[in-house]
Amino acid sequence: MTTAHILGFPRIGARRELKAALESYWRGDSDAAALHSAARELRRRHWQQQRDAGLDVVTVGDFAFYDHLHNVTALIGAAPQRYGFEHGVDLDAYFAMARGTDTQPALAMKKWFDTNYHYLVPELDAATRFTLNRDWLFPEVREALALGHRVKVVLTGPLTWLWLASAAPGVDKLALLSLLLNVYWALLAELKALGVAWVQLDEPILALDLPEAWQQALSTAYRELGSAGPQLLLASYFGSVAEHAPRLRALPIDGLHLDLVRAPEQLAAFLDDWPADKCLSLGVVDGRNLWRSDLNRTLSSLHRAHRVLGDRLWISASCSLLHVPTDLQLETTLDPRLRNWMAFAVQKLDELALLKRALRDGEAAVWRELHAAAAAVEDRRHAPSTQVRAVRERVAALTADDARRATPFTRRRAAQQARLQLPPLPTTTIGSFPQTAEIRAARAAYRAGRLGASDYREAMQAEIRRAVRCQEALGLDVLVHGEAERNDMVEYFGEQLDGYAFTQHGWVQSYGSRCVKPPVIYGDVSRPRPMTVEWSRYAQSLTDKPMKGMLSGPLTMLFWSFVRDDLPKREVALQLALALRDEVADLEAAGIAVIQIDEPTIREGLPLRRDAWPAYLDWAVQAFRITSSGVRDATQIHTHMCYSEFNDILPAIAALDADVITIETSRSRMQLLDAFAEFRYPNDIGPGLYDIHSPRVPAADEMRALLDRALAVVPAERLWINPDCGLKTRGWAETEAALTRMVDTARAARSAL
Ligand code: GLN
Ligand code: ZN
């Protein structure tokens, strides 16, 4: 009989119960007992949901108070020395590493592969040793067994844990492997003794470009762990592992999980000569998106695997359901038609159970459910909103000229300079000004219908006046309107575009107690009317200085949303690009001479494998350029990017051909700028002169030193002066103080030129 299971379930709770419990504990409003009891209740509920749906095992070990990788760090006793913990990691030590202490910063956070989930980076140093800490994981396993469940334990595997860790200088990660394997071996043996039959070890690094030494280490590790006791399911996801097929086949593991949503073609590399003593778990339900599966198509693709594998066929979601919202049942205000196209984690359990029943009892036995699923898929396929003729035709008619400014940068630059008359080392900001409690209150009141449209407009205009007055007093050169009307970079635009929908409870964990609620791109995207023009026009009417219009770029709109799966991402990006291009044109027509298109996510979209980078960068650059290229020479296009790891994609950044790029550099003390200089980045550049993540106002000589560093590598005539990012999280007092200093620094440097 086919086994149905999942790799993991969202831990935050359908109503974000874990968030509430954590934040209450951190505030000191509740004690550890209350936190543990909230956690137990969530686990109990999630296991029961798996069982009620009809899955064959419940997955235990996917719960975490902050992050599942951090749980492994606690379980194997790998706290970095710098925290000085004397006895293993208890609950408060766990949070101390996650959130920092008075004397020690928190562990670094990084994005989990190509998702928006962040893990806590383990730290390895010369003193790193491992000891099994049974206060973690074991209580949860006993809990599940006591509830009478068939338990499969899940843990991040040793190779992936080690790969993701950061190593102090001189520490060779692989040299730590044998110590690490000792503790994993002991752990597995004890789980077996507890009565756990299956352990799933996640090794998502298999989907990366894995160096030979690590591939060999994988064999070493699993040859050892294979004898520890429980049956082992090695789980890969987020990409194909076909190239490792011979190696994986030879390992003494009992099963392998493949992500067939991301890489359906890899099944061919495994199915035919898969050893008779091993199962194959096929991830056929999308764990990264919220669309209902095309179950009939899935079933027809499973039939052959079912024939070949028989009882050794397992079915699952492609990866952990951590990356999708919990329960569609709570969405009571979503358009019912759209809602019928979706499946959140709970609904995906039902899909898996249904697939299992169809394989076991035959499709006729479940024809009613299969029919309903097929009808939903058909309805979506033919819905007018998912195929808007005018949008499709416009994308199809795009030419190379649409993605190219009419003249090269140097000519445009002269035209812009003649129009804008900016001084050398011009000063500007990145867009947002402090989002005060009053601003938030006004937006909330407007949404709730407690504030009328004209009162709301007046409130926002008052904020614009305040921001403009402040910038004029400071003597900034290119002003912004301050973005008071924006709750968020994507939602603000998504709400005004056709093809976007918003859920009420579609929360997904980002890190710790933080969740995001990505909008949903369900249909063809177009812009029914201008989105920002009125605000920018009003702001420009208040000043003689140039007012910079402010937009989120097509890639950011794409990557921070759940995207439809029935159209290539590239197509969706081009639709977004055309909608935003119209906004750029309208801003220009309204007399806005400088327009910034924020693209903080271009790096986020990079595929996991390098060989797929060029194709992605090609359409990413094209989408940006379609947005930005419809303007006259004298209109200046800016772009802005934060997270600073784009040294390796500088050619693509340059290919965006923005007239000015502003980047986050102050925390790295302008290091990133060296890469731009070395690459001979051709256009204007504004390296951030101060960090906006803290209220601290840097000393004048600190800013001056950074500016001098920038001047040493970028010619003065191509350098701009600005903060690292938007100021929305800052207060007014520190904002004015820091900007005063920034403008003074620019003036002093100008007179020395
Ligand atoms: N214009 C946006 C702001 O200033 C940019 C935000 C970002 O880069 N993340 O808030
Ligand atoms: Zn930024």
Image (cartoon, rainbow, N blue to C red):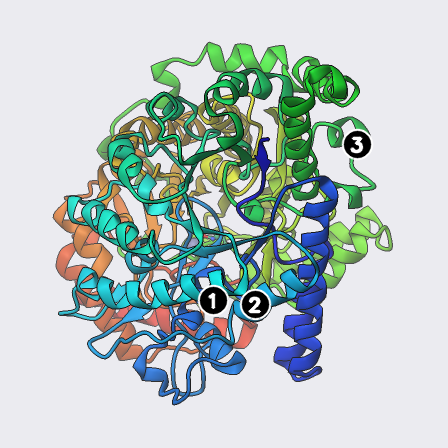
Foreground of the two, 326 or 540: 326
Secondary structure of residue under mark 1:
helix
Indicate the quadrant of ligand 2 in the picture.
bottom left
Residue 488 seen in the current view: yes
Disc on the earlier residue, 1 or 3: 1
Note whether 75 is above or below 254 in the view shown: below
Q: Separation of disc 2 and disc 1 at Cα? A: 8 Å
Label 3 CA crowd tier, 10 Å (few <14, some 14–19, many 20+): few
Q: CA distance from mark 3 to mark 2?
A: 34 Å
The residue depicted at 62 percent of the width and 21 percent of the height is: 294
Task: Specify few, some or many for label 2: CA neighbours under 10 Å numbering under 14, 14-19, or 20 or more.
Answer: many
Disc nearest the viewer among 3 and 2: 2
Quarter holding residue 89 = bottom left
**Image quadrant in which the N terminus is located:** top right
What residue sits right under mark 1 in the picture? 71
Is label 3 in a helix, a strand or a loop?
A: loop
Q: Quadrant of the C terminus?
A: bottom left
Q: Which residue is located at x 59 percent, y 42 percent?
A: 537
Q: Please name the residue that numbered disc 3 is placed on.
A: 335
Residue at the disc numbered 2: 65
Q: Which residue is at 68% across, 64% downward?
A: 146
Query: Do callouts 2 and 1 mark residues in contact (Cβ within 8 Å)?
Result: yes
Residue 98 pos. (x, y %)? 46, 72
Q: Amino acid at mark 3?
A: Asp
Residue 196 lies left or right of residue 704; in this view the side is: right
Residue 618, placed above or below residue 753: above
Report how far apart the C-alphas of labels 1 and 3 lie in the structure. Answer: 39 Å
Q: Residue at x 50, y 81 (%)?
A: 90
Q: Hey, which quadrant is residue 195 in on the image?
A: bottom right
